[in-house]
Image: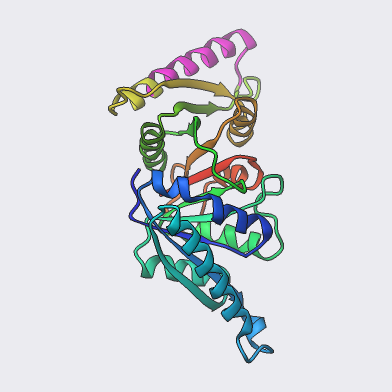
Amino acid sequence: MINKNILLATDLSDLSIKAILHIGPLIKKLQGQLSLIYVVKSYFSDWISSHEVQRVAEQRLRHYLQRLNEDGTQTGNVIIEVGNVADQVLAAADGMDADIIIIGAEEKSALQRVVFGASAEAIVRQARQIVWIHKADSFKGIQKIICGVDFSPSSKGAFEKALSMAQNFEASLEVLHVIHVPNVEAIGLSKNIGEEKILAYKAQKTDELDAFVSDYNTDGTTIKKHVLWGNPAQVILNYAEDDDTDLIVLGEKGEGQIKRMIMGSTTEKVMRSTNCSLLICR
């Protein structure tokens, strides 16, 4: 996945500053150009007529870009806006024709900060771009990627990006399809017949996953495929934690969800709880 224009939204917290200063290797690997945006909440402008907050923020961000540029990272612009954080970030991303928006988030309390957290969720819900939720104060490389798929158009896009990332970073890729165990008694089946049908259904989904992956050129990439039981979001979260995953890749919407403002429940739950970085694809 090669991105020409990358926009990183920062709230200038300690963690997000560390992320900016150490994200150069990721931007280089993506062969992208990095711009930074900081949005001053509109209520500040009501009583700081001198716009000192904006000036200080711009000064700091320009200093960070200069440091990154000196380290060989391709850098773009510093953008300082006043108003609603999500609205301004989305407008800036569209205005610069960004390919990806990066949002910094705390590792243990993902997207739960009072101000920036709510804005981050709004950005993810409404962005036309791929959104990368960066869950660390530095970039230490990507060795393990997992991609959740439900065979919807959105998950096809997610798999394409996950495969591209795996090839670009020479990382392993694990593809997960998660199915619920049906309540056989509720649908009027005996347990024996129900178990047979459950196993047959899993075999069918395994074949579908094999066919899904076979449509792509995966030469040179280590790919493992898994059909697993359980709640999709929790299974993905558990698998990522147990397997020491560096990056989760998911589609924005599940089957049948077509409105821009609607995000798939699995993606939303993973976004709120994961301790590793997350790439959300359109």
Residue located at (65% from left, 20% from top): 185
Q: Position of residue 125 (x, y in %)?
A: 52, 57
In the foreground, 62 or 267: 62
- Name the side, left or right, on which 31 lies relative to 110: left
Q: Position of residue 100 (x, y in %)?
A: 42, 54
- Image side of residue 210 versus residue 175, left or right: left
Give residue 204's position: percent from left, percent from top: 42, 18
Q: Position of residue 96 (x, y in %)?
A: 36, 67
* Residue name at image x 31 percent, y 23 percent: 214
Question: In the rendered structure, which segment of residues is drawn in magenta?
Answer: 188-208
Q: Give the color scheme: rainbow, by chain, secondary structure or one colour.
A: rainbow
Taken as a whole, is the magenta stretch helix, strand or loop?
A: helix
Q: Is residue 109 left or right of residue 263?
A: right
The residue lying at 60 percent from left, 40 percent from top is 276
User: Which residue, as the protein is rendered here, is positioned at the far bottom?
Assistant: 49
Query: Dividing the picture into quarters, in which one does residue 216 lie?
Result: top left
